[in-house]
């Protein structure tokens, strides 16, 4: 397969999606790009595939855990339930350490993002598949959700103080004399956070999978194996980095002030 082809290219409706996204009106109003440069949109099908996979895993776990008495003792065979238990326990431990006592209210966001990013990253290790996380559209959408989430809970926790803190981070009367300086700097730093989250994840995935499949194209039998191991590590680390930074942003904006 060439660079712009994957297994998604053979899915029903792929050509129709290509024509829709290549329309100038759509591109100018939504993508704001050049219609001549619109290429293939594998990340849309890849994201849908990950959503379907996670939904199936959730249904399997729900069915198997419907009778809790039968699952008090973990099964000796490693399966979907065991994987989800280990994964969620790791995410909960991370959230508790970073966010603190109120971490449970943020589990739906961080847990969902962790599962989606984890499986999206690993999808790129399968030959012929393109991960949704090597596209800025996908990663920026995830980062934007985090941005809206921690600002919403920041306003719920501190009210108007969430906004005034941007103008006067010192929290003193003298600090208002420098609001003309602190305000733009703090607002810029706030707006950069979702961009840094999105770019960091996408660029790492693009670089990792580009190196992997470059060596796989040279000699597909043994040469790519070390890079598959490195790619596995990168997939795990980038999931952790995204979730840790998201937890840090939530903690910074929801923590009670000490002054």
Image (tube, rainbow, N blue to C red):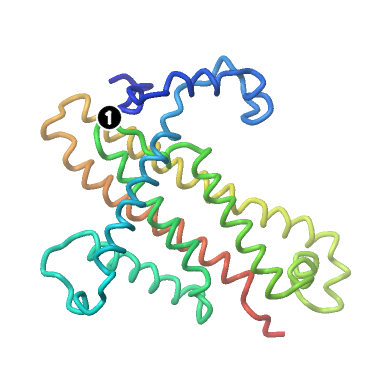
Q: Quadrant of residue 175?
A: bottom right
User: Which residue is depicted at the point 35% across and 28% down?
Assistant: 8
The residue sitting at the top extreme is 36
Q: Where residue 86 sits in the image (x, y, percent)?
A: 27, 67
Q: In the rendered view, tell whether residue 193 sits above or below residue 24.
A: below
For label 1, the residue is 128
The answer to whether 168 appears left or right of 6 in the picture is right
* Viewer-side residue, 51 vs 30: 51
- Element at label 1: loop
Quadrant where the image shows the N terminus:
top left
Q: Position of residue 159 (x, y in %)?
A: 75, 73
Q: Residue at x 75, y 65 (%)?
A: 166
Lateral position of residue 196 relative to residue 97, left or right? right
Q: Quadrant of the C terminus?
A: bottom right
**Circle 1 crowding by C-alpha within 10 Å: few under 14, some 14–19, many from 20:** some
- Which of the pair 137/21 is nearer the observer? 21
Q: How many marks?
A: 1
Position of 192 relative to 126 (above/below):
below
Query: Residue 196, percent across and down?
Result: 55, 49
Residue depicted at 41% across the width and 34% down the height: 45
* Residue 40 as seen in the image, left or right of residue 180: left
Task: Determine whether 145 is above or below 45 in the image.
Answer: below
Q: Up-down: is 111 above or below 191?
A: below
Q: In the displayed orientation, state which residue is furthest to the bottom.
A: 259
Residue 247 x/y as whole percent: 51, 66
Position of residue 77 in the picture relative to residue 245 (left or right)? left
């Amino acid at each position: 397969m060439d660079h712009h082809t994957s297994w998604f290219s053979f899915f029903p409706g792929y050509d129709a999606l290509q024509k829709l996204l290549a329309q100038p009106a759509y591109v100018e109003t939504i993508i704001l790009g050049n219609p001549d440069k619109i290429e293939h949109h594998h990340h849309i099908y890849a994201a849908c595939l990950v959503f379907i996979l996670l939904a199936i895993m959730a249904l399997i776990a729900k069915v198997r855990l419907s009778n809790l008495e039968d699952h008090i003792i973990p099964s000796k065979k490693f399966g979907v339930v065991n994987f989800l238990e280990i994964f969620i326990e790791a995410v909960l431990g991370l959230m508790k350490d970073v966010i603190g006592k109120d971490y449970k209210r943020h589990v739906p966001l961080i847990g969902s993002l962790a599962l989606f990013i984890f499986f999206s990253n690993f999808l790129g290790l399968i030959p012929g598949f393109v991960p949704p996380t090597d596209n800025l559209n996908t990663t920026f959408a995830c980062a934007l959700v985090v941005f809206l989430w921690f600002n919403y809970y920041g306003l719920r926790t501190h009210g108007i103080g969430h906004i005034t803190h941007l103008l006067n981070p010192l929290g003193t009367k003298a600090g208002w004399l420098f609001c003309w300086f602190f305000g733009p700097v703090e607002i810029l730093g706030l707006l950069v956070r979702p961009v840094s989250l999105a770019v960091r994840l996408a660029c790492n995935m693009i670089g990792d999978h580009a190196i992997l499949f470059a060596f796989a194209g040279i000699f597909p039998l043994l040469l790519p194996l070390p890079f598959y191991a490195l790619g596995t590590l990168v997939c795990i680390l980038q999931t952790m980095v995204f979730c840790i930074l998201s937890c840090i942003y939530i903690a910074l904006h929801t923590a009670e002030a000490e002054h």
